[in-house]
Image (cartoon, rainbow, N blue to C red):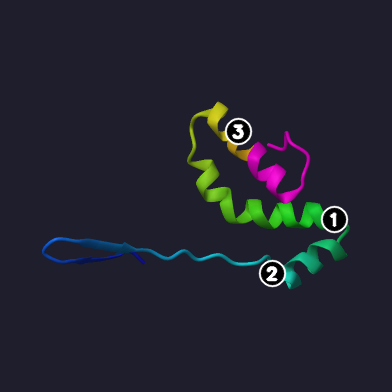
């Protein structure tokens, strides 16, 4: 949550970020249905990002973003 404290001669700014780990129960559920660990992780990540990715109209930009996400979650590049 951004915060500004403004004095006469100075400005201080701060912010925070929120991050979470993959839900192990959901990952286990997907793996129990035949997905590999990396496939389960990829599906979980993309399920959280689907709404945002769907709003990107530039196909080239969307492909670049998807490839970078795939690299981060250990999937092979090229998933669409």
In this view, the residue farthest toward the front is 9
Give the vertical position of 26 relative to 69 (above or below).
Answer: below
Name the quadrant containing residue 69: top right
Q: Nearer the viewer, residue 9 or 29?
A: 9
Q: Nearer the viewer, mark 2 or mark 1?
A: 2
| Span shown in magenta | 67-80
Location of the N terminus by quadrant is bottom left
Question: Is residue 75 inside the magenta stretch?
Answer: yes
Give the structural element (helix, strand or loop) at label 1: loop
Residue visible at 48% across and 32% down in the picture: 57
| Badge 2 or badge 3: first in the primary sequence | 2
Q: Residue 55 placed where, x, y %? A: 48, 41
Mark seen at residue 25: none
Crowding around mark 2 (Cα neighbors within 10 Å: few <14, some 14 to 19, many 20+) is few
Give the vertical position of 60 relative to 28 (above or below).
Answer: above
Name the quadrant containing residue 31: bottom right
Q: CA distance from mark 1 to mark 3?
A: 25 Å
Q: Residue 46 placed where, x, y %? A: 64, 51
| Badge 1 or badge 3: first in the primary sequence | 1
Residue visible at 71% across and 43% down in the picture: 71
| Badge 2 or badge 1: first in the primary sequence | 2
Name the quadrant containing residue 12: bottom left
| Residue picked out by circle 2 | 23
Give the structural element (helix, strand or loop) at label 2: loop
Using residue 78 as the reference point, say whether residue 3 is left or right of it: left
Give the structural element (helix, strand or loop) at label 3: helix
Crowding around mark 1 (Cα neighbors within 10 Å: few <14, some 14 to 19, many 20+) is some
Give the vertical position of 24 relative to 73 (above or below).
Answer: below
Location of the C terminus by quadrant is top right
| Residue picked out by circle 3 | 64
Q: Residue 30 placed where, x, y %? A: 80, 62
| Residue picked out by circle 1 | 35
């Amino acid at each position: 949550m951004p915060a500004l404290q403004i004095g006469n001669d100075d400005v201080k700014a701060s912010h925070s970020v929120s991050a979470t780990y993959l839900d192990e129960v959901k990952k286990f559920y997907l793996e129990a249905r035949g997905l590999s660990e990396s496939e389960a992780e990829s599906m979980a990540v993309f399920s959280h990002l689907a709404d945002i990715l769907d709003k990107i109209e530039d196909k080239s930009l969307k492909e670049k973003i998807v490839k970078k996400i795939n690299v981060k979650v250990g999937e092979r590049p090229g998933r669409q």
